[in-house]
Amino acid sequence: MTMNVTSPGLDDRLSEAAVVDAAHVDVSYNVRDTDRLAVRDVSFQIGRRESFGLVGESGSGKTTMALAITRYLARNGRVSAGTITVNGQDVASLHRHDLRMMRARTVSMVYQEPGRALNPSIKVGRQVAEVFEIAGLSRPDAAGRAEEALRKVQISDPGRVLRSYPHQLSGGMLQRVVIAMALAAEPNLLILDEPTTALDATVEAEILELVSALRAEFDTAILFISHNLAVIAKMCERVGVMYAGELVEQGPALEVFEQPRHPYTVGLLRCIPRRGQRKDHGRLDTIPGFLPAPGEVPAGCIFAQRCALADERCRTESPPPYAITGDRTSRCHHHDQAPSLPRATPEDVRLPPPDETSAPVISLRGVAKTFTVRHDRVRALDGVDLDLRLGETLGLVGESGSGKTTLARVLLGLTSPDEGSMLELEGKKLAPLAARRARDQLRAMQIVFQNPDSALNRRHSVRHIINRSLSKLAGLSGAAREKSLLEIVRSVRMEPRHLGLRPAQLSGGLKQRVAIARAFAGNPRVLVCDEPTSALDVSVQAAILNLLADLQARERVTYLFISHDLGVVRYLSDRIAVLYLGRVMQYADAETVFTGPHHPYTEALLSAVPSLDGISRERIVLAGEIPSPANPPSGCVFHTRCPRRLSSGICESTEPPLAEVEPGHMMRCHIPAAELRMLQHIEN
Amino acid sequence: MADEELRDPLATAPGMSSGGPLPPHDLAASLPLVTAGGTGGAAGALDESVGRIRREQLRLLLRSAPFIVGLVLLLWWVVCAIFGRFFVPYNPVNGNLIQFNLAPSGAHWFGTDSLGRDVLSRVIVGAREILIVALLATVLGAAVGTALGLVMGYFRGLVDNVVGRIVDAVLSLPIVIVAFMFLVAVGPSTQTLILVIGLVFALIIARTVRTAVLQERDMDYIAAARLRDESAAHIMFVEILPNVAGPILVEFTVRLGYAIFTVATLSFLGFGIQPPTPDWGTDIANSYQYLAAGYWWETLFPALAIASLVVAINLVGDSIEAVVIR
């Protein structure tokens, strides 16, 4: 059943053998004296210099698998069946010393949050050098090697970084440091667990490119764990798709993503907004049902409850990993039919177009916000002019620190704007703070926050949460309120049985539905959605996006949709505004923003996003980091990183106005739109 | 490596693969329960009902030995406080003046004091007044402190600053000194005692509650409440209060222990519970001068009573804290 290559005499064979060989691995966690299976019968191999991806939604067992390989499982977890070998050594049977050596020399891990992987109270230099000291170098030698290691991860000024404390560095810089530390011992295997999930798109692109380059240089195998299929497609040769603890499909990454042969992979791919898909045309499909509860093992196929292809056999007989072609397997009895999995949602939906003729619902003129942070004046928003039309979705994109959330809070009256900012709702001036706004104005604008755990009071039941909004905003009580409550719960596709539960008892998707129901309770005219799906899995995200689109069509609500995910913004938005350092850089129809001419910043953002469509654009590398809003660059704020900066020096000296370069297309750039179009057309 | 000792073992960088333990978030992430319940979970309603979590907490409490020991001791003193006067072997107030300073024996298990009163009976009945005073003072302190802490934490600004400074000023003095000043000024009585201890505790509890409120007030559910035009009172007492109940409960048990101690100390100094009501602190004050004469039982047993009650409350409090704030 298992490959045994542990005998020490087989050096030659070892060099050809896999770095990791997991064979029929079960991992279980002991919770309240019962074993719960978190990973079931997972087998895969990672060859030398190979990059293998594990993809799947949260709770699928990806991280557990990585921890099992390094024997870092929590105290109540254990590999309950099967074997894992690393470099031919059985991990389970390693003694203390050998295990330490394996972790020190053979396997390294990089985690999602670089800030938490480093000790905040010790300078970076000391922490990097320590890795070399553990490897046996003297202190001065280690310090020298630390500098060299940072150079290898393309840190241009290693001296400064080594002298810094972690909190003084940006997330992208910290992740480079962590990667440098992981590679210090020149491991045979580098495990990257969601290494870019916490980073901005442009930084993510840099880190991914760095990893690709280092892989070639260091000759190391990679286990790349991510929920993001496009990232896996970009980074990995082979991929394993995990669902509820099982490896349901495995094979070469491009083949798996182009011709998936497991219904779950098919469904997952259909949940991701691709080019050409919009809320009304080419709708995202969803995966019906829910992930099985942890530890629950159904009799037949683990995906059968949610699979439209499932028949009697699927419900009784667990499918083995069927071989499809040479190195492709799928755990599906009907793997040949998987590509024709019926859709769970209709493809095309008729949605009323936004009203382009009427006066804007929301009108912002010269909106600015300056925070004072320890005597520094930080300009989070600067002269923002935007109009929201009835029934449209305005997408707001930009990297972290661009002022997206500040703009949303200013609009809602949660943060007061600077003097002179003009905010109007349906032609009437809005007071700077919510407390001074009329009840009707408050009712008109609601918000769906990013993190439902923070947005829902964890001590209140779903019923209480929605009812409170119905009484305060819609002024309902008694039987009328109960009727509305049931109606609204149904319209967000929840069931009355959920009403008595508290947020902690709901999954992420259901929590966000409660937040949406609450926002709609007062029949708002404007709904701010602040990254409403970025904390959710893709299958849940698709359902929430479709729900938002349907509710908008039914209620004629205007959305201000904030997201860092360009695919999601494109799917939902009618128009898009691109923010950088608190300024609108480009503002146009959604299609115009994506087809061009692009503002150079928009162009860089677009090129940074890994895509599943297989078209890899020439990536535009943005030099340096986002400048501090406390000390914005002179002239055009983007000139410090702009790859198309003009040589005349005008970009450094004069800030370009936000000008209408085409009808309905606003851009803040010195380069004429026609020229930008030409430049961008040639290069792509 | 001199820095090694300074380093928190939990913060060891995982990339270093030094065999140290994982950062805490990775341990948590590896628990299937936690990941599936997290925001990314695709699962539906989880089977963890609130009732079940409560039962689980209770089960954990009942399995912890310190909690059981503390609870049994505490219950014993509560029974003494309520029913003690019905089962005392002798009259605790009027002694037999002939049988004074008797050593512990079959007739007087804890001996008698200098006025011929049965020490055992006085210890049993002595639980009553101290528990009443301490409990009422703590209830008062928790109620006022919670309200004050909510106001400070929610409004911040001037209220927070002013009350914060007063708290600092009061807390820079030992509570016994503060109470002493009040009692000297107003004259000792049970009501004054409750009021003084309660108010000083209110300031301390307010500070704890304020810290908890500060963590809550930036949560988005507060913003959502403001956007539906909720009053400040509603936000403080309906939205925030349930979420800071845990720290308040813990603070309550800790303060109760301190209250017992404070009441006993003030009684010992003669400013607490007034004679002829049987009281442990007073009894120690009246008998410790006879220690040199060898009448140790008159001091030892009331002292043990105070110690056992304080320890019992702390055992219960610590166990609750461990379960509530996990």
Image: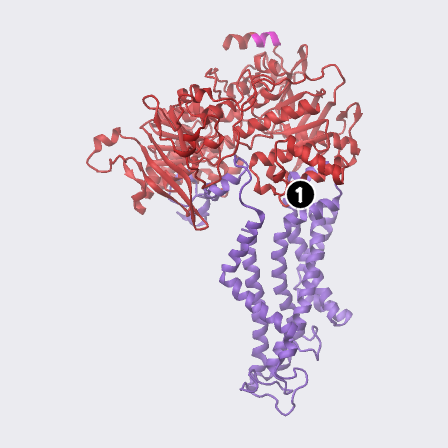
Which is nearer the eye, A38 or A86? A38
Q: Is any part of residue A557 visible from this angle? A: no
Colour of chain B, in one word, is purple
Residue A265 is left or right of residue A369, and the answer is left
Q: Main secondary structure of the magenta part?
A: helix
Colour of chain A, in one word, is red
Location of residue B306 with respect to A184 vertically, above or below: below
Q: Is residue A195 magenta?
A: no
Location of residue A635 with respect to A10 vertically, above or below: above
Name the residue that disc number 1 marks. Answer: B217
Q: What stretch of residues is rendered in magenta?
A: A673-677
- The residue furthest front is A312
Rendering quarter of residue A603: top right
Q: Give the image location of residue B37, x and y in percent.
A: 53, 40
The residue drawn where x is 53% and y is 58% is B61
The residue drawn where x is 30% and y is 44% is A94
Residue A240 is left or right of residue A663, and the answer is left
Q: Chain of mark 1?
A: B
Rendering quarter of residue A142: top left
Q: Is residue A674 magenta?
A: yes
> Which amino acid type is marked by label 1?
Arg
Q: Give the image location of residue A156, x and y in percent.
A: 46, 27
Q: Give the image location of residue A207, x and y in percent.
A: 46, 27
Location of residue A295 with respect to B283 vertically, above or below: above
Q: Give the image location of residue A241, x and y in percent.
A: 42, 29
